Image (cartoon, coloured by chain):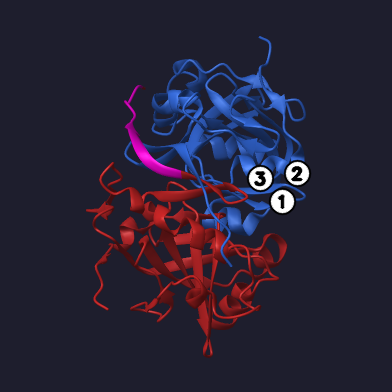
Chain colours: A red, B blue
Amino acid sequence: MASHFRPVALEHASRLLNHGPTVLVTSAHDGRRNVMAAAWSMPVEFTPPRVAVVIDKRTFTRELVMASGAFGLCVPGAALADATYGVGSVSGREGPDKFSRHGLRPQAGPVLGLPVLEDGCCAWVECRLIPERHTEEAYDTCFGEVVAAAADPRVFDGGRWRLHDGNPALHTLHHLGAGAFAVAGKVVQARMLR
Amino acid sequence: MASHFRPVALEHASRLLNHGPTVLVTSAHDGRRNVMAAAWSMPVEFTPPRVAVVIDKRTFTRELVMASGAFGLCVPGAALADATYGVGSVSGREGPDKFSRHGLRPQAGPVLGLPVLEDGCCAWVECRLIPERHTEEAYDTCFGEVVAAAADPRVFDGGRWRLHDGNPALHTLHHLGAGAFAVAGKVVQARMLR
């Protein structure tokens, strides 16, 4: 499958997560793979581009991330609301592969080979885990360094989000709770008043 | 000034930040106070309610937070877009008090006495800093425990966000970069497909 995504410069990677979208965390190790939803992630540094994401220690994803030392974060568009809710509500330890169950067809990321999602998604980043045993244990907070990033140029181009009425399926999802998502499509430009 | 906010149960506090709004970080110590914008914050635990927020070590806010061991996070509504951009673009070390400069009139939080914002805001939380020297130094990531929370019942009531066409000034802001904010007002309900 040809990719319609375009690479995002690493110095712009933080912008993909800057506005707080709910993400899909992808992982793989030793022939097993998984995807879960996470509302709790954020950039922590621009350069080098680093992120933090909360991954509960009881999840299958956490097991794969700790074993592989890597995770992907994919930013789903509004058209993936049902899938995002679905993969966030069932463990990958139970039943069939969650990608297949929700019609998600991952590709292999270019640097770490992680499963990354493009169809229906706005962007993805591949991250190498920065081991931080204390925060992983105490707060389920995992730090990572972004080593590759890409986005759909219809919604993120030239280092900027392009959310508008013409691309509603690619508006980002922001989980309010219980499957209700705020959809970020309207944009306002603030004035600089010092 | 009478408050139109209502207390939020601590077990629901994480929901105030769950969808990734840009927040205003408030702080005070020894007669000095400050407010800055932060796009990078997230809950990290439901109970006890804990959060993480990135506060650059060069900021005046960081100085006050480290000295006082506390910070507030206020969730601005869309009507505060200019003020949010403004307080995020200038240091509180320069010039007059940033609250006054932007017409922000803080009240004293009930538990820690932190300046918290209600007019124009959707919600606030008061947090006690959980000292984590390593992550503060390495990632500017500060952890805190929420000890009080309140929200405007016109937009958050019964533990749930109520974003709709009738309260546009209280739709949350999600910073895309350079003063452009996605405004979260449209809500979709995902279907549970396992």
Cα–Cα gap, marks 1 and 2: 6 Å
Local packing at callout 3 (Cα closer than 10 Å; few below 14, some 14-19, many 20+) is many
Magenta-drawn stretch, dominant element (helix, strand or loop): strand
Are the residues flagged by discs 3 and 1 in contact, CB closer than 8 Å? Answer: yes
- Percent position of residue B2, x then y: 68, 11
Depicted B77 relative to depicted A156: above or below? above
Query: What residue is pinned by disc 3?
Result: B14
Residue range corresponding to the magenta coloring? A183-193
Are the residues flagged by discs 2 and 3 in contact, CB closer than 8 Å? Answer: no
Label at residue B182: none
Camera sees residue A77:
no
SS assignment at label 1: loop
Cα–Cα gap, marks 2 and 3: 7 Å
Query: What residue is pinned by disc 1?
Result: B46
- Percent position of residue A181, x then y: 52, 47
Judging depth in this view, the residue of B84 and B163 nearest the camera is: B163
Q: Residue furthest bottom?
A: A30
Give the amino acid type for the residue marked by disc 3 in the picture.
Answer: Ser
The residue at 28%/42% (across/down) is: A164
- Percent position of residue B189, x then y: 53, 47
Depicted A183 relative to depicted A91: above or below? above
Image quadrant where one finds the C terminus of chain B = bottom right
Give the amino acid type for the residue marked by disc 2 in the picture.
Answer: Glu
Are the residues flagged by discs 1 and 2 in contact, CB closer than 8 Å? Answer: yes
